[in-house]
């Protein structure tokens, strides 16, 4: 089943349900905000107090940070770009088989985006919902001049208890610590007992989020950087649309082209950022 739904306030999303999975994608931001395998805890975390209002980013799921990751030099512009608060077009949906749905959403430059970012573009999100979740974000330069993008699939994963989570696959990788702006090298698995906000570079393999009852695998393509973020106690209190204890049950592992991994696209060139997400029971 693939249905176009509206909340009482008019907020539109697509609901997908089949024999193995369920998902929900908002037209604002092409924001996948729910993904679960039938009978299991959702893979994606969604804040219990998230907004579902136009021009406010949903807190959780997979926000699309584009055409810049983080803050813009022009501080009047939104953190993480404008894609996640723009209305995308729902282009197509297909029930590939009883267990698989494929959807395409698209946004292009308009008067509003050109004021913030003076380039013509086409941005498409291809999502394949099945026992695995495949997300492809394709940027095409429709302008005559080159442009540079930094971006992230800012994926919020649900975890049982952040204190018992380890992230594998980043050992010996260099990272920028966004809390100190120092450059560091990862030693062993990433564990969590404080705020963590790191942009890892030279990432070339799969990342494994090891939780008490499952392992979530994240395989990326078109990316050599990964952002790992947990706001912990104090930062959570300052984040919009997050309950005070939210940090205990979420972790962001973001397939990205961030900082040194930003990409330059010449006129008519395309670049695709891809994440494959799947689980293995322990
Ligand atoms: O990806 C990590 C990060 O850049 C953090 O520094 C924090 O700002 C987080 O994104 C959330 O940003 P948001 O704009 O969604 O509140």
Image (cartoon, helix red, strand yellow):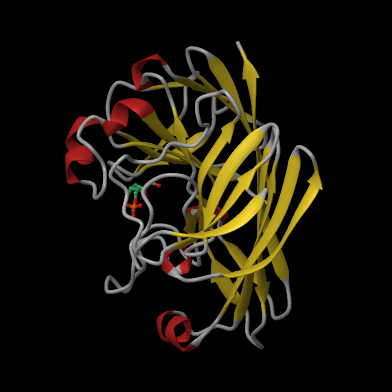
Q: Nearer the viewer, residue 154 or 11?
A: 11
x, y percentage for residue 19?
Answer: 70, 33
Q: Quadrant of the C terminus?
A: top right
Query: Residue visible at 52% across and 64% down?
Result: 27
Q: Nearer the viewer, residue 121 or 199?
A: 121
- Residue in the foreground of this view, choosing between 70 and 154: 154
Residue 63 to residue 105: above or below: above
155 lies above or below 103: above
Determine the residue positioned at 41% across, 66% down: 85
Residue 252, picture quadrant: top left
Q: Is residue 226 left or right of residue 240?
A: right
Q: Position of residue 197 (x, y in %)?
A: 36, 39
Kindly indicate the quadrant of the structure image that contains residue 255.
Answer: top right
Tell me residue 142's x, y (percent): 67, 82
Relative to 265, does residue 151 appear above or below in the rendering? above
Q: Residue at the location (32% across, 74% down)? A: 74
Answer left or right for 19 relative to 185.
Answer: right
């Amino acid at each position: 089943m693939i249905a176009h739904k509206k909340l009482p306030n008019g907020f539109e999303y697509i609901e997908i349900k089949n024999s193995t999975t369920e998902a929900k994608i908002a037209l604002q931001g092409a924001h996948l905000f729910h993904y679960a395998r039938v009978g299991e805890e959702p893979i994606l975390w969604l804040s219990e107090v998230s907004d579902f209002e136009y021009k406010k980013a949903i807190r959780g799921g997979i926000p699309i940070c584009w055409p810049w990751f983080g803050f813009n030099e022009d501080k009047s512009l939104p953190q993480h770009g404008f894609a996640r608060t723009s209305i995308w077009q729902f282009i197509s949906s297909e029930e590939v088989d009883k267990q698989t749905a494929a959807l395409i959403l698209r946004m292009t430059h308009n008067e509003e985006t050109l004021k913030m970012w003076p380039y013509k573009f086409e941005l498409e999100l291809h999502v394949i919902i099945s026992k695995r979740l495949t997300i492809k974000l394709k940027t095409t330069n429709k302008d005559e001049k080159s442009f540079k993008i930094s971006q992230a699939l800012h994926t919020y994963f649900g975890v049982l208890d952040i204190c018992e989570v380890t992230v594998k696959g980043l050992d010996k990788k260099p990272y920028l610590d966004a809390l100190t702006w120092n450059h560091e090298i990862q030693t062993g698995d990433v564990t969590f007992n404080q705020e963590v906000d790191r942009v890892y570079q030279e990432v070339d393999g799969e990342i494994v989020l090891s939780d008490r009852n499952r392992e979530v695998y994240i395989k990326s393509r078109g990316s050599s950087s990964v952002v790992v973020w947990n706001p912990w106690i104090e930062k959570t209190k300052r984040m919009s649309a997050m309950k005070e204890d939210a940090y205990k049950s979420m972790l962001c592992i973001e397939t990205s082209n961030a900082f040194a991994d930003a990409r330059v696209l010449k006129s008519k060139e395309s670049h695709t950022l891809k994440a494959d997400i799947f689980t293995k029971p322990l």
